[in-house]
Amino acid sequence: MNYDLSPKVLEEIKKAKRILLNCHRSPDPDSVGSALAMRKILLGMDKEVEIVCPDNVSGDSKFLKSSDVVKKIDYDNFDFSPYDLFIILDSAEWSQVLGFGKEKKPSIKKINIDHHFTNEKFGVINLVDEERSSTSEILYKIFDDWGVLVDGETAEDLLTGIIYDTSCLEHSSADVDTAKIFVKLMELGADKNKIISNIFRNLNFDMVKAMTEITKNMQIDKENRFVWSAVPFEEISQYPGSFGIKSMAAGLYAASVQGADFGMIMVEEKKNFLNVSFRAKMGFDISKIANELGGGGHKQAGAAVLRGIPFGEATKKVLATARKYAQKTS
């Protein structure tokens, strides 16, 4: 048995007829992949299942076979009464579930399954394993506990989440168990090459141009050993197809520069709405910076959003927080 809570989760599922699943705001491939995989398993149990999200599914997840079933909703106006159970996946806090500016938490039985150590544990059952690389990896272990069949489509959904959240096993969160699951999912029919191509090698031209803006603005703080780039709304808005470029740029550059322990990519996606992605080399814990700025994540990868603050002021706040936790040069 991988998780003592697995049978308890299954018990609640068996009692429910109509089940709601979520993808978190700005859903990444682990959010989408884990939701689609859970949906497929629940459909096999003859449950009625729907997936909801406060945002649209982004291009790096649309290649998944059932991605079009994810329904964009306004949580403040959504009717939860027809559902018996809400399984919340890959979401450490309520703002991730509801989307920004929303506060109406649904009064429905909730199960919380996640891998972020900052998880607020808001479910009647909280299966949170911060040692695992992704929510998709946790679900593989849960399905194994349940003894259910993982078919080729479900395997591809799960491997998509693992590949994205580990950057193809690069991150320290990916251990031997992760690698074994990676191989098993391939054996079950998941196409590794297709997943990698769609996530990492499928840039539209707006994203290429936006990457140029990010690299043009890149700076290094040699004393505090980090790199950073900040792009205001006036610049990034010229490239409407560049959604998701922040995380991609962080993965490429933020933890790769010689003489830097970590990096930050800041993009003002809306006016006075600064979205920040953090990446760190092994040995540096980026989560402390993300947490202080109201975000979260893991030791090597995190994110935060500063809302209602002008671009220059928000950028200064991020830099000041980073310098507070930086390992200064001697």
Image: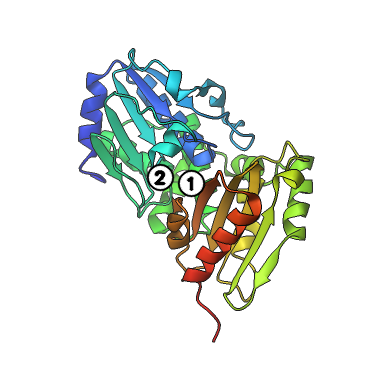
Q: Residue 288 sits in which quadrant?
A: bottom left
Tell me if I can see residue 186 in this picture. no
Q: Position of residue 116 (x, y in %)?
A: 38, 49
The disc label shown at residue 162, or none? 1
Label 2 amino acid?
Glu
Q: In this view, does 214 lie to the left or right of 183?
A: right
Q: Residue 179 sits in which quadrant?
A: bottom left
Give the camera-side residue of 35 and 149: 35
Give the camera-side residue of 67 and 175: 67
Q: Where is residue 72 in the image (x, y as percent from the top left)?
A: 53, 23
Picture layout, residue 299 above or below residue 189: below
Q: Where is residue 41 in the image (x, y as percent from the top left)?
A: 38, 26
Q: Residue at x 79, y 47 (%)?
A: 209
Give the camera-side residue of 166 and 70: 70
Q: Which residue is drawn at 50% across and 64% down?
A: 321
Q: Name the residue under label 2.
A: 137
> Around disc 1, counting alpha carbons within 10 Å, would you say few (fewer than 14), some (14 to 19), or many (20 or more)?
many
The disc label shown at residue 138, or none? none
Picture layout, residue 110 above or below residue 187: above
First in residue order: circle 2 vs circle 1:
2
Picture layout, residue 70 above or below residue 27: above
Q: Quadrant of the N terminus?
A: top left
Q: Are marks 2 and 1 in contact (CB under 8 Å)?
A: yes
Q: Position of residue 76 (x, y in %)?
A: 43, 22
Q: Is mark 1 on a helix, strand or loop?
A: helix
Tell me if I can see residue 98 in this picture. yes
